[in-house]
């Protein structure tokens, strides 16, 4: 009776059908070595986020209104209908074959009182999952690109600022930059060589000046002596003797290649040459009897005028050379100051360059990432990136998943057995009849002398056989009915 009640009641329960679909997570079609995805979200997290979006009140309410679901709950409590639909929608992750722990697909299932309705609603939910994934992937990709673009603009501004600082520093320290150090050294070396040459020129000009002044004095002395009738050259001879004495002293101290020795030798040679020229002029008839202003007097005055002109030219050369030397000294001081300031400028430029290099590296990195992100965004917009693809469309269930009438039938048999055993135990416990000799001894506390067995009559025996046959027949009939019912239930699953 328990089995019959439970099995009959299972057919009164409404049938629940479940439609399932399998969605594959398809990787992007363009190899990652060409386009790197700019959105990296775990499948489980992404699926949970999409599920929360789809299970929102507004979307579920539209589906409920579209398919007229949960009418009774809609009339009494719309929130209860939405909660019930959330329970009826289930998602399950699927691992890749042969790759433990790696998820590659997921299942979407929905339960409804009708097989066709379950399929239709499941198809609608699956479409929402796919569309929501496309939308979220595109939004994430665009957000990543926008973020990188914003950061790139900031990096570009910082780079421009660093470039302006470096440019201003180089402009303000032109000539003192580390890159100009070699050219400054070469220029300074040339200036120093120029300084040395000018110094030597000044020395030579001063020596020439001394020589011309001495020679001019000698010519004037000769002229005076010639006017007085003298023929000796005491001034020239004294000057020549003095130079020879200086040369002899220097030769005892220095080598023949020493500059002072070489200079004195040249002066001695020039003085001797001039002495010979003066003697030759005197030998040509220069006497004191020659009246002043005569052609002979003019002839005597000509060398003096020439020497005075050479002396003036020599003095002007010395002045010009010294002025040039001062200008070269100023330039040398300028370039030395530049070279002395080069280490400081190098350190300052290194600090600016370090900041510039960091800004440049950051800008280049962001530019590369922004370009890659833009490619990935375009890939998502063309739906060439990672997408959801339906592998197994929403199924049309042939059998309900609930209630499981076969299990309920077996449960009814189990309940019947438990109830029968329980009733037998209760009947045995409530029966006060005495059945054994031990019970009589315990109750009466007397010894049993003899026992009289039960002797059934033929009529009682017939009744007993008839009752057993009826019991076995009923038991067989019930067993046959249960087998037939369970077989029918199993076939209807």
Image (cartoon, grey):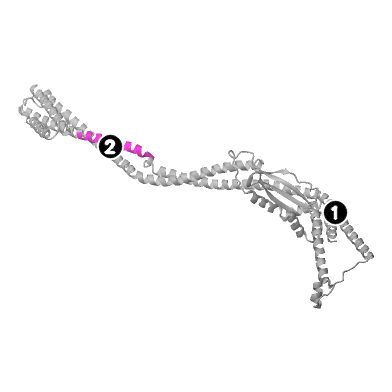
Q: Which residue is drawn at 42% across and 47% down?
A: 351
Q: Which residue is drawn at 70% across and 51% down?
A: 91
Asked if 363 appears above or below 202 in the picture, the reply is below
Residue 143 position, x and y percent, is 61, 48
Q: Name the residue under label 2.
A: 192
- Is the Cβ of the residue at disc 1 closer than 8 Å to that at disc 2? no
**Front-lying residue, 427 or 352:** 427
Q: Name the residue under label 1.
A: 485
Q: Residue at x 16, y 29 (%)?
A: 307
Which label was assigned to residue 67?
none
Is label 2 in a helix, a strand or a loop? helix
**Position of the N terminus by quadrant:** bottom right
In the picture provided, is 322 more to the left or to the right than 103?
left
Q: What is the span of residues highlighted in magenta in the rendered image?
A: 179-203
Q: Quadrant of residue 408?
A: bottom right
Q: Is residue 297 visible?
A: no
Residue 306 position, x and y percent, is 17, 28
**Front-lying residue, 431 or 458:** 458
Residue farthest to the right?
459
**Front-lying residue, 293 or 89:** 89
């Amino acid at each position: 009776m328990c089995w019959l009640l439970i099995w009959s009641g299972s057919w009164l329960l409404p049938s629940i059908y479940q439609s399932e679909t399998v969605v594959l997570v398809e990787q992007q079609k363009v190899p990652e070595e060409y386009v790197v995805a700019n959105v990296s979200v775990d499948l489980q997290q992404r699926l949970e986020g999409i599920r929360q979006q789809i299970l929102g009140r507004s979307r579920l309410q539209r589906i409920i209104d579209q398919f007229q679901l949960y009418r009774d709950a809609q009339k009494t409590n719309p929130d209860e209908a939405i909660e019930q639909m959330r329970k009826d929608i289930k998602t399950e992750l699927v691992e890749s074959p042969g790759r433990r722990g790696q998820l590659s697909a997921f299942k979407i299932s929905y339960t409804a009182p009708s097989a066709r309705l379950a399929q239709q609603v499941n198809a609608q939910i699956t479409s929402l999952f796919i569309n929501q994934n496309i939308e979220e992937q595109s939004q994430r990709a665009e957000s990543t690109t926008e973020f990188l673009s914003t950061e790139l603009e900031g990096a570009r501004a910082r780079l421009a600022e660093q470039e302006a600082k470096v440019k201003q520093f180089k402009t303000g320290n032109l000539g003192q930059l580390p890159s100009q150090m070699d050219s400054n050294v070469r220029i300074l070396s040339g200036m120093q060589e120029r300084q040395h040459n000018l110094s030597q020129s000044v020395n030579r000009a001063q020596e020439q000046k001394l020589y011309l002044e001495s020679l001019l004095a000698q010519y004037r002395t000769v002229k005076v002596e010639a006017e007085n009738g003298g023929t000796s050259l005491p001034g020239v001879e004294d000057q020549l003797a003095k130079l020879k004495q200086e040369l002899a002293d220097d030769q005892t101290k220095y080598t023949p290649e020493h500059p002072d020795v070489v200079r004195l030798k040249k002066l001695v040679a020039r003085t001797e040459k001039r002495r010979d020229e003066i003697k030759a002029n005197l030998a040509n008839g220069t006497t004191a009897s020659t009246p002043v202003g005569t052609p002979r007097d003019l002839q005597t005055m000509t060398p003096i005028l020439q020497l005075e002109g050479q002396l003036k030219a020599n003095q002007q050369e010395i002045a010009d050379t010294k002025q040039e030397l001062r200008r070269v000294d100023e330039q040398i001081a300028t370039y030395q100051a530049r070279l002395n300031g080069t280490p400081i400028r190098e350190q300052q430029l290194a600090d600016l360059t370090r900041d510039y290099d960091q800004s440049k590296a950051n800008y280049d990195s962001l530019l590369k990432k922004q370009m890659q992100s833009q490619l990935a965004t375009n890939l998502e917009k063309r739906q060439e990136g990672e997408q959801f693809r339906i592998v197994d469309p929403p199924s049309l269930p042939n059998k309900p998943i609930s209630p499981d009438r076969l299990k309920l039938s077996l449960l009814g048999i189990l309940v019947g057995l438990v109830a029968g055993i329980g009733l037998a135990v209760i009947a045995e416990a409530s029966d006060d009849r005495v059945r054994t000799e031990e019970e009589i001894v315990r109750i009466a506390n007397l010894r049993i002398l003899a026992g009289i067995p039960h002797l059934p009559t033929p009529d009682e025996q017939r009744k007993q056989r008839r009752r057993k046959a009826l019991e076995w027949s009923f038991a067989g009939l019930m067993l046959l009915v249960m087998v037939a019912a369970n077989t029918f239930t199993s076939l209807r699953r």
